[in-house]
């Protein structure tokens, strides 16, 4: 049993006869923030999707606490939150309804804390407005509210700063630091420089 | 013991949460719901105009016309099953949930039936009357629709899940799904014809019921595998 929370071993990924990355060994421990960098099209999103188990790597294996994620899927997904490229919310529903559904997906009963979580991402007063009337940044914030609402050991975030304003960016940075201090781990892709995150590790894809 | 009870409650939780979410979203954009129903009504009403208004002839073709129209209307409604969830990223959240995907899928297909198959069933007596279908025939029609349309929803969901990642799905989806719809069509319209002729229809209904039971058990497995494959690309 290795002590790494999440580990990718000898990962190789090929899309449309193009090798995105090969023999990639990476991982995060509890209390770490890992930033994945690289130019557009270098396979950052693909790597994140492989780590979540949404996509299969052409070769290699992803392990959660030393076990292949395929075998411990339920346990892994109980401890992991993934914020993808897409909004992850239904436009026709209100912010509150969207988060209630996310809470049900995680198996948590968070009805009381939903408004709190929305308040923390600066959406107080927008709880019961359909999401299609919100701006792109606000929709992004609805999705980010999940991080406040649903505790998870590991966060996998794909470009969490997209469409977020400056104050929002530093709030998210503070959130990442808090998560690491609590013994959680974060893997994220972003083109932003994270200056305030202590002990930030970087992984660069070519 | 308690852990088992918990799991069960959680499953119910996701089942109900899924239905509630899909229902709310659907009723906020009712046009998607109404289109297949309008299609059903329009096709059936055009038949007497185009062929003949003669009651004997209409009575004879009624079972076939009603069932074919209901089948095509269901086919039209399959788009709303997974496409929008795929586009807004909630489908991947469903797959990444610790909850069994089986429960979410069962809830989604059930909601799809509540919003397509059930209204078609409730609408059918009115259209049956327009085609001079007898009371026995109408009763059989409603029973077969009640048992048959959920099967159509389940089979359609397999096709919809297989094609969800593709750009243009229309024709491919029909090609995939239509052959699998044919047994339902044969048994169901056969039952209505038998009812008109005054023959017992229990056998037909039992076969439809068997198809439904098979669909409930096996289709979610196929759907969840298909969704995982579609999203892995």
Image (cartoon, coloured by chain):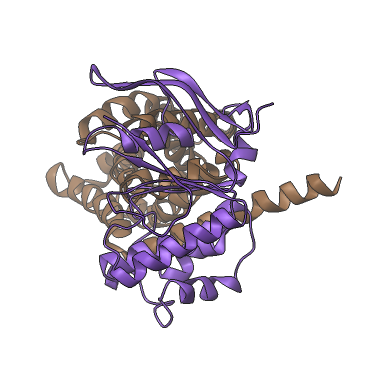
Chain colours: A purple, B brown
Image vertical order of residue B31 relative to residue B153, above or below? below
Q: Residue at x 44, y 38 (%)?
A: B196
Left or right, A11 with reference to B69: right
Quadrant of residue A166 within the rendered picture = bottom left
Q: Residue sitting at 51 percent across and 42 percent down?
A: B96
The one nearer the camera, A51 or B223, is A51
Q: Based on the displayed image, in which of its 4 quarters is residue B173 positioned?
A: top left
Residue B131 visible to an observer of this rendering: yes
Q: For residue A92, say whether it is visible.
A: no
User: Looking at the image, which residue is at 58% across and 52% down?
Assistant: A152
Q: Is residue B15 left or right of residue B195?
A: right
* Residue in the image at 79% along x and 49% along y: B5
Q: Horizontal and vertical percent for residue A94?
A: 41, 70
Q: Position of residue B120 (x, y in %)?
A: 39, 52
Q: In which quadrant will I find the N terminus of chain B? A: top right
**Towards the viewer: A148 or B25:** A148
- Residue A184 place in picture, x, y as percent: 58, 50
Q: Nearer the viewer, residue B183 or A36?
A: A36
């Amino acid at each position: 049993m290795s002590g790494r929370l999440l580990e990718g071993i000898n990962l190789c990924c090929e899309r449309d006869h193009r090798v995105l990355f090969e023999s990639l060994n990476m991982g995060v421990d509890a209390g770490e923030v890992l930033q994945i960098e690289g130019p557009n099209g270098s396979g950052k999103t693909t790597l994140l999707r492989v780590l979540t188990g949404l996509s299969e790597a052409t070769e290699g294996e992803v392990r959660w606490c030393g076990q292949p994620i395929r075998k411990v899927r339920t346990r892994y997904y109980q401890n992991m939150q993934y914020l993808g490229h897409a909004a992850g919310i239904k436009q026709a529903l209100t912010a509150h309804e969207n988060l209630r559904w996310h809470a049900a997906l995680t198996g948590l009963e968070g009805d009381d804390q939903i408004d709190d979580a929305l308040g923390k991402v600066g959406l107080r007063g927008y709880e019961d407005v359909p999401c299609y009337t919100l701006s792109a940044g606000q929709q992004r914030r609805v999705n980010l509210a999940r991080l406040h609402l649903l505790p998870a050991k590991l966060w996998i975030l794909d470009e969490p700063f997209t469409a977020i304003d400056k104050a929002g960016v530093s709030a998210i940075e503070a959130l990442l630091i808090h998560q690491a201090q609590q013994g959680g781990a974060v893997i994220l892709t972003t083109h932003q420089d994270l200056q305030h995150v202590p002990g930030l590790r970087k992984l660069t894809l070519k | 013991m308690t852990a088992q009870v918990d799991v069960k409650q959680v499953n119910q939780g996701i089942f109900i949460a899924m239905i509630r979410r899909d229902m709310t979203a659907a009723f906020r954009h009712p046009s998607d719901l109404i289109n297949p129903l309008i299609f059903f009504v329009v096709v059936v009403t055009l038949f007497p105009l185009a062929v003949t208004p003669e009651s004997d002839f209409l009575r004879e073709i009624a079972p076939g016309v009603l069932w074919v129209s209901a089948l095509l209307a269901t086919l039209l409604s399959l788009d709303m099953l997974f496409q929008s969830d795929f586009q807004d990223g909630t489908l991947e959240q469903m797959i990444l949930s610790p909850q069994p995907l089986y429960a979410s899928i069962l809830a989604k297909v059930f909601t799809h039936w509540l919003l397509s198959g059930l209204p078609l069933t409730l609408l059918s007596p009115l259209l049956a009357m327009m085609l001079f279908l007898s009371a026995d025939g109408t009763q059989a029609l409603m029973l077969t629709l009640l048992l048959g349309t959920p099967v159509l929803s389940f089979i359609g969901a397999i096709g919809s899940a297989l094609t969800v990642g593709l750009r243009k799905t229309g024709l491919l989806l029909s090609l995939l799904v239509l052959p699998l719809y044919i047994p339902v069509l044969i048994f169901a319209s056969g039952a209505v014809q038998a009812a008109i002729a005054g023959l017992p229809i229990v056998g037909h209904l039992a076969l439809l019921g068997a198809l439904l039971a098979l669909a409930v058990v096996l289709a979610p497995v196929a759907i969840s595998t298909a969704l995982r494959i579609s999203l892995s690309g």
